[in-house]
Image (cartoon, helix red, strand yellow):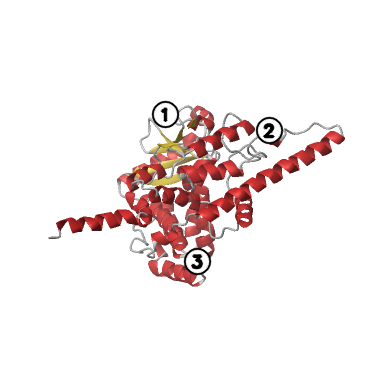
Amino acid sequence: MREYIGNSLIAKLKPEQKEYDVWDTKLIGFILRVLPSGAKVYRCEYARGKRVTLGKATVLTPAQARDKAKQILSQAVIGVLPANECKSKAKLTLKNFITNEYEAWRAANRKNGKDDMRRLRVNFLDEFGDCLLKNISPMLVEKWRTQRINNGIQSTTVNRDIVILKAALSKAVEWNLISDHPLKKLKPFKTDAIAKVRYLDKNEEMRLKEALQFRNEELKQKRENGNQWKKDRGQDCLPDLRDFVFSDYLTPMIFISLNTGLRRGELFSLTWTEVNFEHALLTVKGDTAKSGKTRHLPLNAVALKAFKDWRQLTSKEGLVFSNKNTGEAFSHVKRAWATILEKAKIKSFRWHDMRHHFASKLVMAGVDLNTVRELLGHADIKMTLRYAHLAPEHKANAVAKLVEFEP
């Protein structure tokens, strides 16, 4: 976006979901950045890809910021870097970088930005947040992750945390805050992808469904008792849950997850406009999908019925599942999920494992891996190959073909 940066422009610019820049039409290199929080910051690009912050729009007038930009640009022509940039780069700690530079960008540009920032803060800032960016080394991080493994943390979890840290440092390199990526040569721990596949056996599936039925009945009885109490006191009653299949969100969430393989975030952000009842088709939009690409999922009879039955009880517009207290999307259902697993006597089964269950059942039913990949929304077939061992007859058939060439 290019416009003349002045008071009238600053007054009318509105924040968006992602930060954006406005480039001045008269002074090349003079920029106004608008953050999702609504804050506006003047910046100056004095060389290709090299920028320096001039100050906030609440502190500097456009004219003052423009003068500072002119001074920096004129010095850059003769090879003189901004003094404050040289100083800040040399003294920039991981904590300051994360807090002042990276956090707003990550939250605005990544779907799991808030959760990633929480992991980054919890796992790294207390440990070596005061360490200068230029002093972060593979040995420092190696000691940290070794200690984590010794404390019983799974290697997959440690790898995931390291990926988040490396992504932050990659952005520091891109922004010219450090010259080289300090963890470029740090390799992840080797993990057994097959070992992570957890799905429900027939007995567990049966116990889960029974526990959900019991929970539904319990909630309906609770509503019935509550309405009777209200009726005895002349108060308005709530809708009778016995008129509906489901009592609340949990059962349809689980049925849909088991039969579509949706990620938790995809399920929580799903809207009714993305559910096509006529064609039994579900659309997962790219802005909620991990891959960033839209995909279409055919709904089987169980998933379609779950959507239809749930729609009778909830709003016909907006989010399919929303928090009844705030009207916003769920961030988690940890307590309800843990309780239902305990009732069903199912152990070591995470919410995400319902996605594994969906994929595993497909492969065991003879569905080819590429189709499974498309349904799951995997960008790479390598992710789907973790389920290949569940179709041993395919391997057996392949080996059996050798017999055809025997004399």
Pick out the residue farthest to the right. Answer: 233
The residue to which callout 1 is attached is 3
Q: Nearer the viewer, mark 2 or mark 1?
A: 2
First along the sequence among labels 1 and 3 = 1
> Of marks 2 and 1, which one's residue comes earlier in the chain?
1
Give the residue type that dot 2 points to.
Answer: Asp
Which residue position is annotated with label 2?
A: 243
Q: Residue at label 3?
A: 153
Q: Amino acid at mark 1?
A: Glu
Q: Nearer the viewer, residue 240 or 296?
A: 240
Residue 350 visible in rendering: no
| Residue 270 pos. (x, y %) | 52, 37
Q: Quadrant of the C terminus?
A: bottom left
Q: CA distance from mark 2 to mark 1?
A: 59 Å
Q: Secondary structure at mark 2?
A: helix
- SS for callout 1: loop
The reply to whether discs 3 and 2 touch (Cβ–Cβ < 8 Å) is: no
Vertical side of 335 occupied by 133: above or below: below
Q: Position of residue 333 (x, y in %)?
A: 60, 48
Q: How many marks?
A: 3
Residue that appears at 50% across and 66% down? 153
